[in-house]
Image (cartoon, rainbow, N blue to C red):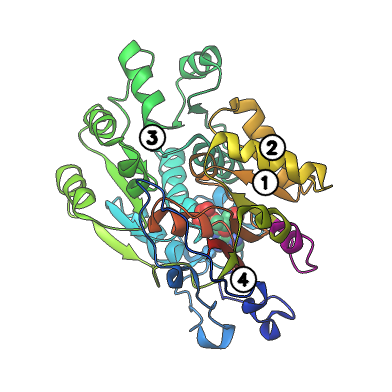
Amino acid sequence: MPYSTQRRPGSANRSPRAYQSRPSTRRPSKSKFSKQYINPSRFVKAAQPAADVVEYIPQHAFADFALHPLLKQNIADKGYVTPSPIQDQTISQGLTGKDIIGIANTGTGKTAAFMLPTLHRLLEEPHARALIIAPTRELAQQIEEEARSLAKGSGLFRAVLIGGSSMGEQLRDLKSLPSIVIGTPGRIKDHLERGSLDLSTFNIVTLDEVDRMLDMGFIADIRFILDSLAHERQSFFFSATLDPKIRELINTFLSDPVVVSVKTGETSDSVEQDVVRYNASHEKIGKLHDILTQEHVGKTLVFDETQRSVERLAKELQERGFKVDSIHGGKTQGQRTRALKQFKESKLTVLVATDVAARGIDVADITHVINYTTPQTYEDYVHRIGRAGRAGRTGYALTFIDQ
Ligand code: AMP
């Protein structure tokens, strides 16, 4: 039952308060410019014990969906037994050809929710083409991985159009007229402008993490891309929120969409959240070291603010003997992909990252997210901690707070 919230063994008796140190009388340091003030109480929240979570009873088994047999086989090969709530509610609607708006937190299985109906149509309709737009390179690559395993043996060509990776390879992939194009808005637009991509026959489109894309300033690029698609098309929009800017986009580009919402709370219910208080910045590294060496702390994603501070922290942790690497915007795509792969394969136990580089990271067994510095906005916080507690596991999020 991958989607019922389960407690990790032994976690029920542990008090997250144990992470806190004694209060101090030091005056708070000057707040940082342009950072949203977030009341520290918003960083403290217990994960819902399994007994409190009403277990979702799916209305369908994967076998019930009118999906192509190849897809059913690949679903089974991936070990997916029960559809997650968003899959349960999206797949059959998606197969009818309707436009879908999915309101879902990260880690809910939303990728397969849009990918399965998309692949089904690509297999059934020889002229169908699909475009998937994601805010970051990492998310685009993860979507590609999911597409690759779900479409195994289908012979469908894919192209991944992201910044920081070889243009020559992308141009070559586009020449083979791929059925699925996955990419980030900037690079997709680049290809449209240089004439290497023609979207006029693309009749299935997914926008993943629409809220993030708008936050990152991609609105004009997205409009430009959507205007280049076939007029008759099916759209999937996935977002954690539905704010007015997103509604406007929906009103312009979707027709009579079905809204599927599986969002439960502001932050993932499966993440136990607490703060770590420190009095002086030189104390921070020692506290982080102590946390990372605790027995129950497994794979950990540590967030820091700038490329330089991420580098510095990763170096410090490496000198202390941790298996660590870092990802940030100053690294090449190759370096970022390699670090992420090693983290996934458990060759690294700690990954230090900036917000942008970490968006979309899906490593199922991250136990802890540590905010070594507080995020710019509460929304960033929600995205950061969503990297833990995925696929039915309980995760832990700890935020360092200057007293
Ligand atoms: P996503 O929200 O699409 O990033 O998916 C989160 C994680 O859940 C990924 O590691 C998926 O491989 C996994 N997942 C998706 N659907 C299922 C399912 N039905 N059963 C088990 N795991 C799943």
Report how far apart the C-alphas of labels 4 and 3 lie in the structure.
33 Å
- The local crowd at label 2, few if under 14, some if 14 to 19, many if 20 or more residues have their Cα within 10 Å, is some
What amino acid is found at the position of numbered circle 1 in the picture?
A: Leu
Residue bearing mark 3: 131
In the rendered structure, which disc, 4 or 2, sits on the residue that comes first in sequence?
2
Q: Nearer the viewer, mark 1 or mark 4?
A: 1
Q: Are marks 2 and 1 in contact (CB under 8 Å)?
A: yes
Question: Can residue 340 be seen?
Answer: no
Q: CA distance from mark 2 to mark 1?
A: 8 Å
In the shown orientation, is residue 368 left or right of residue 219?
Answer: right
Please give left or right for residue 75 compared with residue 171 in the image: right
Where's residue 401, x and y in %? 53, 62
Q: Position of residue 88 (x, y in %)?
A: 44, 66
Q: Which residue is mark 1?
A: 351
Quarter of image, res 336:
top right
Residue 287 visible, this angle: yes
Residue under pointer 4? 394
Is 7 in the magenta?
A: no
